[in-house]
Image (cartoon, rainbow, N blue to C red):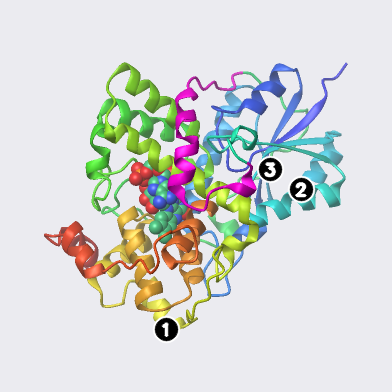
Amino acid sequence: MDNQKVIYWFRNDLRLHDQEMLKSLSGQGYSIIPFYCFDDRFFSETDIGFPRTGAFRLKFLLESLHILTRQLEDLGTGLIIRKGNTAEELLKIHHQTGAKEIYAAREFAWEEKMIEQEIQKTTQLNLILHEANGLFKESALPFDVDSLPDIFTQFRKKVEKHLNSINRIDSVNALQPLPANLDTGKDISFEDFGLAEPDEDARAAISFTGGEDAGLKRMNDYIWESGNILTYKKTRNGLLGKDYSTKFSAWLANGSLSPKKVIAEVNRFEEEHKSNVSTYWVKFELLWREYFRWVARKYGARIFFRDGIKNERNNLRQDFTDFERWRLGNTGNDFVDANMQELLQTGYMSNRGRQNVASFLVKDLSVDWRWGAAWFESQLIDYDVYSNWGNWMYVAGVGNDPRENRYFNTRKQAERYDADGKYRKVWLKR
Ligand SMILES: Cc1cc2nc3c(=O)[nH]c(=O)nc-3n(C[C@H](O)[C@H](O)[C@H](O)COP(=O)(O)OP(=O)(O)OC[C@H]3O[C@@H](n4cnc5c(N)ncnc54)[C@H](O)[C@@H]3O)c2cc1C
């Protein structure tokens, strides 16, 4: 008798490690059809004139899928890749294979949830969601999500101790072959999105290459090989080079690296080698990532509202001229411009830079923060819906910042973090 066929819909979990559900399905003998869809709504044009997914992130995503495909082929199966409307494409696979159940990682953001609902309503297929991309499952949180503290520190204090129990992370190492005659799809490339492959800028902080291999390698280098993790707390506000911070963000964003895997590895390093305030601080920052996921779960679409989750009215303007000056790094403020140039030319910017340019757009230029968030969404290789909109709300004063009227004085920040002007020199050199 044929094994029962099910679809595994890959979303932001483009990896084989930390895939509890996939592993369990394969252990139960299901015939799994691995599936990915470039959903058109994430590749459309924004109202302000740039693509929602820009060329840098697209490149990283294509590389990540290429690696995942190869890994699945090595296991004797493959990846069905489609472009279009996810629900419609899943329905076609159902018609071709008879698979009635779809397994996928649950997301909390509004559009991602809309897609889930569309699948459930329009296809009548059974969508079974599990939690794969955070550190904690909702059922393991020591509070009800509706009571998630609005202040990060309170959240951290409640959950931090549970990080210690994140240890061994397994990988999927066996899957049944794909059903015969199932077309895996044509090669999808830049042209399909009307974008050109971006050139690599020699000044880039790091060369981000998509895929689980490269993500695990970066993790291994940063933690074990170089031991840079031991000085993270001191260097993390840096602006130049690959080692002032982990650079894990891009792999974490599309799930080619799982946050649990990183925590498990840091725990192991602490146990077997050394533990200090810097090793702790990497975990601390990953809790920020986790926090913004739960903020989105609690507040839903409000993370995209002008007045944010605080429902705080503001008089921000939709001034296109000022926005374009900011977006293209032509504001006349050299620290802001250098950071915006880095983002424009490479798809990455340091955390220090992000805080400064976001504050400048909102507090100095009084431009709608959502436009800034939209530009980051387009341009950042490591764009993550929760971290991006959560941080933007925070800087704009409509999110989780308990302090009123926080303001980054970009001149003072430049003096402090780029005292010799080296960073500005790199990026303002034309
Ligand atoms: C306006 C603004 C927008 C941002 N947009 C994004 C985004 O789209 N995607 C994204 O991953 N991060 C975003 N961040 C958070 C942070 O800037 C990046 O995670 C970080 O710079 C990525 O580099 P790294 O991996 O070397 O970070 P590290 O300093 O090495 O931190 C380790 C990891 O901790 C997490 N982390 C660190 N700081 C934060 C933070 N403030 N919020 C949430 N998680 C954090 C990330 O997963 C990061 O990879 C944003 C910050 C700001 C101020």
For disc 3, the neighbor class at 10 Å (few under 14, some 14 to 19, many from 20) is few
User: Taking 144 as reference, is 348 left or right?
Assistant: left
- Whether disc 3's CB lies below 8 Å from ligand 1 is answered no
Left-right relation of 129 to 164: right
Above or below, 388 relative to 362: above
Query: Magenta residues?
Result: 144-173
Whole-number angstrom distance, CA of label 3 to CA of label 2: 11 Å
The residue tagged 3 is 185
- Quadrant in which the C terminus is drawn: bottom left
The 10 Å Cα crowd at callout 2, few under 14, some 14 to 19, many 20 or more, is: some
The numbered mark, 3 or 2, whose residue comes first in the sequence reads 2
Closer to us: 163 or 49: 163
> Which residue is depicted at the point 43% across and 31% down?
262
Residue identifier under label 1: 321
What is the x, y in percent for residue 349?
34, 56
Q: Answer with left or right where residue 246 lies relative to residue 30.
A: left
List x then y, in percent, for residue 63: 49, 42
Q: How many marks?
A: 3
